[in-house]
């Protein structure tokens, strides 16, 4: 790890150190009933405090369709430092105005947010988000990819790519638009590996992406150790690690919460079990350690590898 690496958090620039444990893909700034602001704040702070007690010190929020200034109390009181994102999710969540706005104008707007921050406390983003749900990109998505690649190169910011399908081609699209390979990581590539015909395809895709210099971020190992999903995802991760690709793997949980009926809850996951922000430390990391003990996975997957995104 480069000891000079710094990351822009919602509380200012953070110097990454040997004690940090970084989750690069979570969802904290979610939508909620504003009449429940106090309850939401209490709930989320408790969740983040639990994560901090398990060793997590930095969490990247990848909710691209909300604003961090609705979460000032969480930002200020959370023991975990939070990194906010800037970018685009799927078409449903992209403001209609962007479809009518010129690329250069959007880049200008994004640049102002990065340089000056947003809201009364001038909160600056520390990571970019871009999403593709299908094999091919629409013209609007190509526009968004170009914006994110341009901004990433200009401000040296990492890119979280939501790409459950056709991931290699989508990474290449970002690189064609000027993104730096080592600034890009792909999420959701493990989706579907429990299907035998998909496992080999996804392994090959991961290898191709890593050969470019980009990263694969793993998140979903289910919640039951002996489930087909869990065993398949573990095999997927271990095959990549055993192939000498461990330096380009990241681990996070893609956890989130929501308002349901009369309370805030972590999103239901795997037959009703909740996926808390402690998921990585309490579940996926121990499982991986049990089947791959050649290296310090906590140090590699939660510090050394993610810290390079902010070199």
Image (spheres, helix red, strand yellow):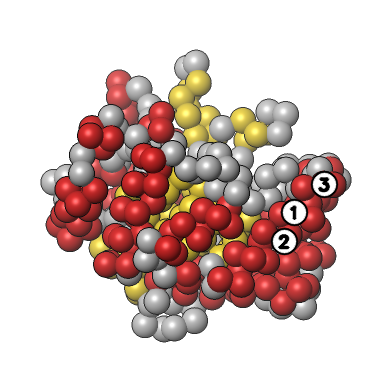
The residue lying toward the viewer, choosing from 50 and 8, is 8
Q: Position of residue 232 (x, y in %)?
A: 80, 50
Residue bearing mark 3:
197
SS of the residue under disc 1: helix
Residue 58 in sight: no
The residue where tag 2 is placed is 204
Residue shown at 47%/43% (left/top)?
Answer: 137
Q: Residue at x 71, y 54 (%)?
A: 202
Where is 263 relative to 257, above or below? above
How far from the left and from the top, in percent, is residue 140? 36, 39
- Residues at marks 2 and 3, CA–CA distance in whole angstroms: 12 Å
Disc 1 to disc 2, C-alpha distance: 5 Å
Residue 32 in view, yes or no: yes
Locate the C terminus and report the quarter of the image it occupies. bottom left
Q: Looking at the image, is mark 2 or mark 3 earlier in the sequence? A: 3
The location of residue 263, given as percent across then percent down, is 48, 22
Q: Is residue 299 left or right of residue 40?
A: right
Count residues near mark 1 (Cα–Cα under 10 Å), then give few for <14, some for 14-19, many for 20+: few
> At numbered mark 2, what does the secondary structure look like: helix, strand or loop?
helix
Alpha carbon distance from label 3 to label 1: 7 Å
Give the residue drawn at x 29%, y 44%: 68
Q: Secondary structure at mark 3?
A: helix
The residue drawn where x is 42% and y is 63% is: 176
The answer to whether mark 2 and mark 3 are in CB contact below 8 A is: no
Query: Seen in the image, is 240 located left or right of residue 121?
Result: right
Question: Dot 2 surroundings within 10 Å: few (below 14), some, or many (20 or more)?
Answer: some
Residue 287 spot, x, y in % from top left:
76, 58
The answer to whether the residues at label 1 and label 2 have Cβ atoms under 8 Å apart is yes
Identify the disc placed on residue 201.
1
The reply to whether callout 3 and callout 1 are in contact (CB within 8 Å) is yes
Frontmost residue, 30 versus 169: 169
């Amino acid at each position: 790890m480069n000891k000079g690496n710094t990351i822009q958090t919602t509380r200012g620039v953070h110097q990454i150190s040997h004690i940090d444990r970084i989750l690069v893909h979570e969802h904290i700034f979610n939508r909620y009933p504003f009449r429940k602001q106090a309850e939401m704040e209490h709930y989320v702070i408790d969740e983040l405090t639990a994560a901090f007690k398990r060793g997590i010190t930095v969490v990247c929020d990848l909710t691209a369709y909300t604003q961090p200034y609705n979460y000032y109390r969480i930002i200020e009181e959370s023991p975990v430092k939070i990194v906010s994102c800037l970018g685009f999710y799927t078409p449903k969540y992209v403001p209609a105005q962007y479809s009518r706005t010129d690329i250069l104008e959007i880049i200008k707007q994004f640049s102002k947010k990065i340089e000056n921050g947003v809201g009364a406390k001038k909160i600056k983003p520390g990571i970019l988000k871009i999403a593709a749900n299908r094999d091919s990109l629409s013209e609007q998505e190509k526009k968004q990819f170009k914006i994110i690649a341009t901004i990433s190169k200009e401000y040296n910011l990492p890119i979280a790519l939501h790409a459950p399908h056709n991931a290699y081609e989508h990474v290449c699209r970002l690189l064609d638009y000027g993104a730096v390979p080592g600034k890009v990581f792909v999420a959701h590539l493990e989706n579907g590996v429990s299907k035998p015909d998909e496992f080999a395809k996804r392994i090959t895709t991961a290898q191709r992406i890593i050969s470019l210099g980009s990263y694969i971020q793993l998140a979903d190992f289910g919640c039951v150790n002996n489930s087909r999903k869990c065993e398949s995802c573990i095999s997927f991760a271990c095959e990549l690690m055993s192939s000498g690709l461990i330096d380009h793997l990241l681990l996070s949980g893609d956890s989130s919460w929501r308002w349901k009926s009369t309370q805030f809850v972590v999103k239901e996951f795997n037959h009703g079990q909740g996926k808390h922000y402690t998921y990585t430390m309490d579940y996926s990391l121990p499982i991986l350690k049990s089947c791959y003990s050649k290296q310090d996975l906590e140090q590699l997957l939660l510090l050394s590898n993610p810290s390079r995104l902010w070199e």
